[in-house]
Image (spheres, rainbow, N blue to C red):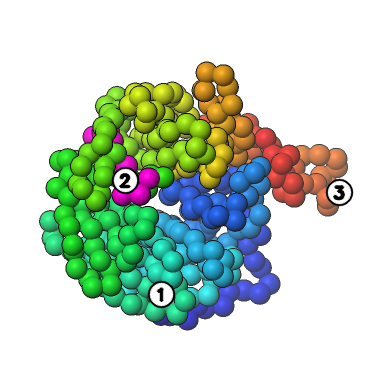
Amino acid sequence: MTRVHTQSRILQTFRALGVVASDVPVAYSRAGFITAAIGKSFQVYETEKLTPVAVSAQLPKKIRALTTVLHKNQTFCAVGRDIHVFERVKETTILQGHSAPITQLLAVGEYLFSTGEDHTMRVWSTLTLELVNSIEFADNFTPTVLLHPATYLNKIVVGSAQGELQLWNVRTLKCIYSFKGWGSEVTSVAQSPAVDVAAIGLADGRIFVHNLKFDVTLMQFAQPTEGRVTSLSFRNDDKSPWLASGTSSGDVILWNLETQRLQAKIPVAHDADVATVLFLPSEPVLLTSSGDNSIKLWIFDQLDQTARLLKSRQGHKAPPTTIRYYGHDIQKDGMVCQILSASQDRSFRLFHTAREQQSA
């Protein structure tokens, strides 16, 4: 654990204009907020209108993964080999222990799990911010995703680039079961509303709804033309048993678990890999984010049960080429809050420095 160096008290980051999201999956808080990595910092949005409410200071390197803990409003950011700890948007501590860059973070109760390119999983206490345990994987097992199955006390499922999955008891530090997998890299996992059941997405586009207790596949889907499965989420409003999957082509696909068929498709929901698909609790609303610098809310309120874009927060997909203040006499008026921006993505946008709702 390293002490955080105090930054300048004169200049402090206020907010980033036009930077909305990245290719890092967003973290959802039960309090109705999402946290999105934006390069070397992160931004917090409320989910109702996607209005930004806070932004962190810049970190030394790009954030590769993040997760949040409701207790103390903590945010954990993986930056290189370190984990930077924030309370709200104030950095408090740096956790060190990995010998290679960290790739995944998962917070469960009072514990934080981190996996890295050093083939290890480290367990940290979110209360004391100290290292509790460490697990070293075999050389032929490269961890890619983490999942805490509901009701599985002290258990974590770890997916691998080789296709195998392992169930670990993180208290006894023993692998208690190995799932042989399906011969393709595990790219996403999601807990279903049903106990013992999880969705497992692969790099070849296949999705398996699997019973972890009996190691039995309940159903299978495939999206061979849309590319790898990048994210998974179950709808949980008790109205439609759907599973949403994000793709590397930018499409979002919805699968009906009753009919075991394709329910709907949102073509070109994003212009880059879909980093996040997330059904909001008890709502017919799907949140998606992507490396195309956008976060979107889709609502399913149509008679044919197709998706309608409800809200979106977007920025340029490529670097801006020209920016100018706009409004009144910019030479005399110090209250000008509008900025016009043109970009290499052939778009023209207006950003408001004080009221994000007026940005377009």
- Marks 1 and 2, how far apart at CA: 27 Å
Tell me how far mark 2 sits from mark 3, CA to CA.
60 Å
Residue located 32% across and 66% down the image: 154
Question: Does the segment drawn in magenta span residue 25?
Answer: no
- Tell me where the magenta segment starts and ends, as one range: 194-208
Q: Which residue is mark 1?
A: 125
Whether residue 60 is visible to the viewer of this picture, yes or no, is no
Residue 334: image x %, image y %?
83, 52
Q: Secondary structure at mark 2?
A: strand
Q: Amino acid at mark 1?
A: Ser
Q: Earlier in the sequence, mark 1 or mark 2?
A: 1
* Quadrant where the image shows the C terminus: top right
On screen, residue 114 versus residue 84, left or right, reads: left
Residue denoted by label 2: 197
Is residue 329 visible to the viewer in this orientation of the structure?
yes
Q: Earlier in the sequence, mark 1 or mark 3?
A: 1
Q: Quadrant of residue 153?
A: bottom left
Q: Check the image and report above or below for 100 versus 262.
A: below
Q: Earlier in the sequence, mark 2 or mark 3?
A: 2
- Looking at the rendered image, the quarter that the N terminus falls into is bottom left
Residue identified by numbered label 3: 333
User: Which mark is drawn over residue 311?
Assistant: none
184 or 150: which is nearer to us?
150
Residue 160 % position (x, y): 22, 51
Quarter of the image where one finds residue 314 = top right
